[in-house]
Image (cartoon, rainbow, N blue to C red):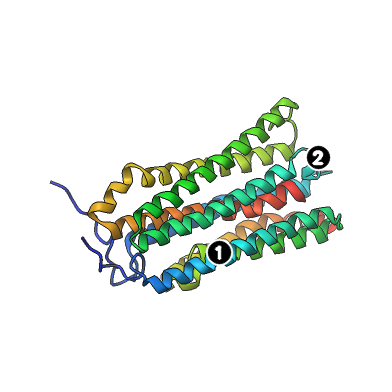
């Protein structure tokens, strides 16, 4: 016997939204608090330090700029993936979701090269406060990229079977995954200047 | 099949979706240009406080574009706005209260 979760597709009369949409926004709100706490920690550490290095002392600005462009591009392809489903064009969804996943992979690859270069030069989280907060913030952000890719990968692959039985439910899932992916992009938009450029 | 159940989320008319897609391309271009500005600010070698203010201003504009258009906040239900408003009410003290404790140092920077 299976129990059906209510309001995954239909709009709840009292909220005007389906439950998935409310759930993802509540989750995003908690994410805002998580990163907000870390941004506050960054401010505290920075103003409390006798001196603070410019990001370029340790970090590679061209690589970070490339990563910014990659994430922005992936946000657009995510919108196009969702829009393709609304237009009932599944092959185009597959294409754009695939590009989004590849962009995520590209972002992580660049981050891998950045991290290994740091380690090669003997820069570790324990080296100084700047590198500690750098690795904490970008590491946590990287974990979010991996999480987003896992969800997107599921929706691109096995999860897409839902499209055949309930296309609207599947479209809603993709939209919710997109909301998370855009938050990951949004967080990076702030991480880029505060860590690399200031 | 339940294709007619959720006009808000998945069954937006094709016209609506086309509008979203056009907006997405515009936002994409804007974000690329603003990223260029962000990097340019770095090479201007402005005084630290001015550089921080300008970089955060550009980041806020970029973040607002992402939230408004990519995350569809320009046309979202009232409940979502309330949730985000409450988050902002809790988030601002989280960000500002610790900063206030070191305000004297912030002013020195």
SS at mark 2 in the image: helix
Q: Is residue A26 left or right of residue A48?
A: left
Q: Residue at x 75, y 27 (%)?
A: A121
Along the viewing direction, whichever of A40 and B48 lies nearer the viewer: B48
Q: Could you tell me residue A131's position as x and y percent?
A: 71, 37
Task: State which chain disc 1 sits on.
Answer: B
Cα separation, mark 2 vs mark 1, equals 35 Å
Is the Cβ of the residue at disc 2 closer than 8 Å to that at disc 1?
Answer: no
The mark lying in front, picked from 2 and 1, is 1
Along the viewing direction, whichever of A30 and A134 lies nearer the viewer: A134
| Label 2 sits on residue | A57
Decide if residue B82 is in sight here: no
| Label 1 sits on residue | B25
Q: With respect to residue B16, does A138 lie above or below?
A: above
Q: Residue at x 71, y 47 (%)?
A: A195
Q: Are marks 2 and 1 on the same chain?
A: no
Crowding at label 1, few (<14), some or many (≥20) Cα neighbours within 10 Å?
some
């Amino acid at each position: 016997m299976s129990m059906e979760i209510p309001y995954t597709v239909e709009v709840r009369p009292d909220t005007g939204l389906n439950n998935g949409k409310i759930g993802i926004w509540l989750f995003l709100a908690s994410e805002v608090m998580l990163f907000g706490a870390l941004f506050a920690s960054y401010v505290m550490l920075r103003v409390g330090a006798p001196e603070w290095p410019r990001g370029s002392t340790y970090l590679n600005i061209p690589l970070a700029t490339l990563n910014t462009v990659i994430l922005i591009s992936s946000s657009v392809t995510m919108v196009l993936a969702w829009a393709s489903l609304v237009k009932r064009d599944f092959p185009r969804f597959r294409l754009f979701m695939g590009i989004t996943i590849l962009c995520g992979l590209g972002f992580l690859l660049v981050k891998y090269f950045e991290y290994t270069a740091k380690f090669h030069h003997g820069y570790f989280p324990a080296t100084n406060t700047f590198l500690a907060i750098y690795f904490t913030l970008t590491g946590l952000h990287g974990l979010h990229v991996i999480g987003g890719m896992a969800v997107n990968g599921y929706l691109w692959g096995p999860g897409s079977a839902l499209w055949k039985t309930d296309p609207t439910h599947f479209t809603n899932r993709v939209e919710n995954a997109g909301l998370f992916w855009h938050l990951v992009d949004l967080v990076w938009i702030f991480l880029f200047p505060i860590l690399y450029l200031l | 099949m339940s294709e007619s159940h959720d006009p808000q989320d998945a069954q937006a008319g094709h016209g609506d979706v086309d509008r979203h897609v056009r907006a997405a391309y515009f936002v994409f271009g804007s974000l690329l240009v603003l990223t260029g500005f962000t990097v340019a600010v770095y090479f201007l070698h402005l005084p630290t406080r001015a550089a921080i203010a300008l970089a955060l201003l550009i980041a806020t504009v970029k973040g607002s574009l992402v939230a408004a258009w990519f995350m569809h906040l320009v046309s979202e239900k009232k409940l979502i706005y309330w949730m985000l408003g409450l988050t902002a009410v809790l988030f601002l003290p989280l960000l500002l209260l610790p900063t206030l404790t070191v305000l004297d140092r912030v002013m020195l920077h």
